[in-house]
Every structure is written in C-alpha cells, then in structure tokens.
Amino acid sequence: MSPLGTEPAEVPLSGRVSLVVNGEKHAATVDNRTSLLDLLREQLGLTGTKKGCDAGACGACTVLVDGLRVNACLTLAVRLAGAEVTTIEGLADDGQLHPLQQAFIDEDAFQCGYCTPGQIMSGIGCIREGHTGSPEEIREWMSGNICRCGCYVQVVRAVEQSARWA
C-alpha cells in the first residue's frame, strides 16, 4: 500500500509491436520506454540510423515513419503498431543508390559521415514536402539536422540536385 493509502496502479512494462521496416514485417516485444532508435539498432540490428544526442536536437537518428521524417530517439516504438518505417538501409533499390545518396557522393556532402544517414533521410522528407524552392528554404527545413563537420553547403547542393530529379 502506498503512503497515500491506495494501491499503486499496475502498468504493463512491455508491449508487443508489429511494424514494417524497410519493406519487411517485424514483431517485437519492447519495454514501453524503448525508442524507435533503440528498437532499430538493438533488436533489429539496423545500425545505419545513428544515435547522436538522444534528445532530438541533432537529427542523426532521422528516419521516415509512414513517409514523414521523425527523430527516432524521441519516438516510442510501442506506439508504432502497423507503421511503415524507412531507414537508410532501406533506400537502395537492387543495388542502385537512392538519387539523394548519389547526390551526396556527387556533391561530397559528408566528411566524418556520422550525421549522413539522418541528413539523407531528412533530405528525402524535405523533397517530398516540397521545401526545395531555394537554398535558403532547404537550409531552413533541414535545420533540425546538425553536422559538426559543417558541410552544409554541400548538403544543400545535394538536396537541390536530387530535388531536380524527383
């Protein structure tokens, strides 16, 4: 009995979630506090999505959920029943890089590469959302993705290049 004289509520500590990741169905039992990022990296072995700040500030963990970009570190896995998740590992098609992946190579839009998966996933979201009208617009809509190496000029050029092909 609690000091207030009531029984503590029983809260389930784990839940089961089924979702589609990169076109493949997965079912997992997760602690209710497990982030999508930890589910992807620790249970599904998809380590392309990076853990940066783990607080939603750097964007290194950006993935697409039902086509929209989200910070995987801030998204509870147990809430994604039936969702379609796309990670950097799910972009290439039959060995062909996604046009934005190729644009990152063409524009030399990475240095250490740690933020690159999140930058690419966010760039795809930016293109899909139609926020590629100018370099300024791309910078504004990509502002949630931080690169310590500072290759923002090349990232903007890569998103511009890929948007022209879309």
Image: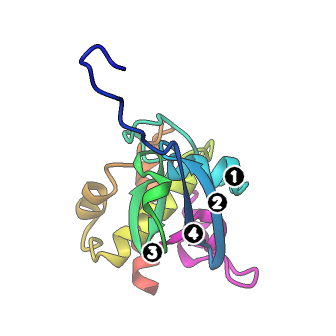
- Mark 1 is surrounded, within 10 Å at the Cα level, by few (under 14), some (14 to 19) or many (20 or more) other residues, namely few
- Mark 2 is surrounded, within 10 Å at the Cα level, by few (under 14), some (14 to 19) or many (20 or more) other residues, namely some
The residue lying toward the viewer, choosing from 70 and 10, is: 10
| Tags 1 and 2 touching, CB below 8 Å | yes
Q: Amino acid at mark 4?
A: Ser
Instruction: Return the mark for residue 43.
Output: 1
User: Coloring scheme of the render?
Assistant: rainbow
How far is the residue under mark 4 from the one under mark 1? 13 Å
Sequence-wise, the earlier of marks 4 and 2 is 4
4 vs 3, front mark: 4
How far is the residue under mark 4 from the one under mark 3? 36 Å
Q: Amino acid at mark 1?
A: Gln
Quick one: quadrant of the N terminus? top left
Instruction: Return the mark for residue 161.
Output: 3
| Tags 1 and 3 touching, CB below 8 Å | no
The residue lying toward the viewer, choosing from 39 and 154, is: 39
